[in-house]
Image: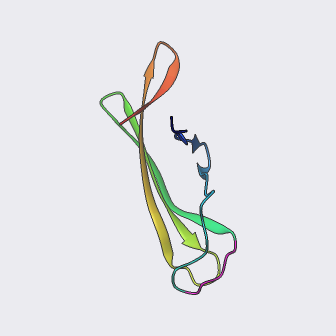
Amino acid sequence: TGRGCGNTCLENGSYLMNYVGCNQCKKRDFVMITNRATEEDDGEEIITYDHVCKDCHHVIAKHEYTFSVVDDYQVKLL
């Protein structure tokens, strides 16, 4: 029996539990959220943003989450 980590999506970004450091400058510092955008498409909300190294501005990761509201609950779509 294995243990699943599950998925976590936070209002202001992703949970960077396994972040070791920037691949470019090798520093482990806070990451900035840039290029955050929210758009709606046919009842679905699409949130996109980039995680960028605070020190060298290297793009660490690009994120996209799609949500829909079902019976007043926000549901993450796969």
Q: Residue furthest top?
A: 71
Against 17, residue 52 (above or below) is below
Magenta part of the chain: 25-29
**The quarter of the displayed image where residue 62 is located:** bottom left
Residue name at image x 52 percent, y 41 percent: 7
Q: Main secondary structure of the magenta part?
A: loop
Q: Is residue 66 magenta?
A: no
Q: Is residue 64 left or right of residue 15?
A: left
x%, y% of residue 32? 61, 67
Q: Position of residue 43 (x, y in %)?
A: 35, 27
Q: Nearer the viewer, residue 54 or 19?
A: 19
How many callouts does the rendering have? 0
Image height of 52 relative to 48, above or below: below
Front-most of 61 and 19?
19
Residue in front for this viewpoint, 55 or 8: 8
Q: Residue at x 65, y 82 (%)?
A: 27
Q: In the rendered view of the protein, which quadrant contains the C terminus?
A: top left
* Residue farthest front in this picture: 1
Residue sticking out furthest to the left: 42
Q: Residue at x 55, y 39 (%)?
A: 3
Residue 27 drawn in magenta: yes
> Is the image coloured rainbow, by chain, by secondary structure, or in one colour?
rainbow
Image quadrant in which you'd find residue 18: bottom right
Q: Residue furthest bottom?
A: 25
Residue 20 position, x and y percent, is 61, 71
- Left or right position of 68 against 32: left
